Image (cartoon, helix red, strand yellow):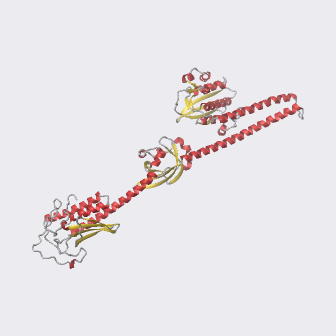
Amino acid sequence: MGWWTRRKGERAGSGPERPSTPEPSGLTAAPDSRAIPSGAPKEDADLDSMPSPAPLSTPIPAPSVEHNAGACTRRLRCLSRVAECIHQYDHIDALLRDVAAVLPFGWEYAEKANAEIVWDGRSYHSDGFERGPWTLRSDILLDGRARGTVEVSYLEPCPSRGEDPFLSEERTLIKAIAHLLGVGIERRRAKQSLSEAEEKFLGLFHNAHSGVLLIEQHTKRCCLANPMFCRMSGYSPDDIPDLQLSDLQPPPEHDSEIDPQCSPLIGQHAMLQDLPFRRKDGTLFFVDMSSFPIMVGDREYWLDLFKDVTERKNTASLHDEALEQLQTSNRELNDFMFLVSHDLKALRRGMDLIGLWACGQGTDLSEAEARVQIPHLTERIQRLDDMVTLVVRYSKIGQIDETPAPVDLHRLVQDLVEALAVPERITLQIEPTLPVVQTRHTAIREAFCCLLSNALRQVGEAEGLIRISCTEDDGRWRFGVHDSGPGIAAPYHQGLFRLFQATPNGHWEDFGVALAMAKRSVEACGGRIGLESTMGQGSTFFFTLPKTRIEEPCLVGRSGQPVERQTARSGPHPAREAGSA
């Protein structure tokens, strides 16, 4: 073992005399001038009954200072080597085997000493081990119980101080070695148990079907995530330590989508359902989350478990949306049936009256009165036809499979102004730079058409103003159609966008369909519609559209035909001149 060597197969007294085993550098072996009779009792025997040593022909020399220093150094080096073995080896077998090999060199007469270590029924010996009659033993304790022994024995008589061949320093040394071995073995077993537990934990951590995320409570910094959470969120394991909790929470514009039941702070000891999180690409995914506060050392963490329920959430959203659409359709159908039945009954009564008059059966209707009723019948028939036409147009909005394309809204609005024949008494102001948007041409045209028609009805026969504006609002376009009409009271705002709901000013030319068509058209383009109005100050119907990247150079103008941007912008429009005037 390094600087300790020993010859195998040779023993003192078993043949010609041999030189002693070399000692470590700086050590000097004591002269073999003292002996203990064979058969001397062991350490635990009664020392008083031990026979007296045989008379020596040569006086025992007193140990020199150099001898004592060398023996002390030898014991320290033995203890140091044992400590090195404990720190060096991970396996108990290798540790005990090497310690047993180096133990004899810590004793005063190393060439006559053998060592044995017994642990859990297994023995580990020094080279050429045979148990001698003089033995020094100490127990190896583990959890307060003796689990093994360390034993050093002399095979042959050797010089002794008095009746005991072992020095008190050697007794202290073997106890220290047994203690070191007990501590070392206990640490290795704890390390092995920890390694096995860590291996099991990592197996569960990496193979879990749920996402696992560890968050430090004080800094709200993400520390560790398993592969399942990385797949859910789109982040790599290397990205996780750079994330804050806020990076995973949805942006403010999605707050309306968060269930108030799920609003408590992430990380509290709770179980939350349908909680929205933000992926690396900005999209949302939904989870059922269980959060547990834990302590690691002196730090507090949140251990969060995630189950991806995005598919369930989307299915539920589709179900709720379909149910809402069905309820809306049923309500609109009931309203339509009520209006149609009312007009059909009025038409039938008029036709019955004219029919009875024509047959001369039981009616006081004069010929002049009958001639007045006939145009009324024609008007009611036309009214029914117009109503059916509008309802059919309404039902088709959003049902046409139309691919979004770039639409020049400036050209589109100019075409609508010409088609609607805006009277000269109405000043029309159009935003100088209406944008080109990527959207459905038919739906956006229907939305502007309905809102412009409504503005004309709100202004009525008086002089007035209609203004079309456009602004940017947090990454979205916001369009407004303002009229200088009498305004609409707040209680009527929400109901105006329902089918067959006329404005409170008594306008019924469109049967309450126009604003419902505008709402449905805007939603088909991915936007939302609303109303701002104050009595006596007019009304502004506004809607938003997502601001998307224009993917194709062609623009859609009149009737959905592609046009060049320069053509769409060329030439002033009379309506624009009227607005600027």
Q: Is residue 146 left or right of residue 568?
A: left
- Rendered position, 203 above or below 428: below
Q: Quadrant of the N terminus?
A: bottom left
* Visible residue check, residue 104: yes
Question: Which is nearer the eye, 340 or 455?
Answer: 340
Q: Is residue 91 left or right of residue 359?
A: left
Q: Quadrant of the C terminus?
A: top right
Q: How many marks?
A: 0
Dividing the picture into quadrants, the one containing residue 74 is bottom left
Question: Which is nearer the eye, 232 or 302?
Answer: 232
- Farthest-out residue, left: 58
Dividing the picture into quadrants, the one containing residue 130 is bottom left
x and y, in percent, of residue 16 in the image = 13, 67
x and y, in percent, of residue 187 in the image = 33, 61
Question: Which is nearer the eye, 439 or 346?
Answer: 439
* Visible residue check, residue 245: no
Residue drawn at 52 percent across, 53 percent down: 271
x and y, in percent, of residue 109 in the image = 18, 67
x and y, in percent, of residue 344 in the image = 78, 36
- Rendered position, 517 above or below 429: below
- Farthest-out residue, top: 571
Dividing the picture into quadrants, the one containing residue 394 is top right
- Rendered position, 113 above or below 488: below
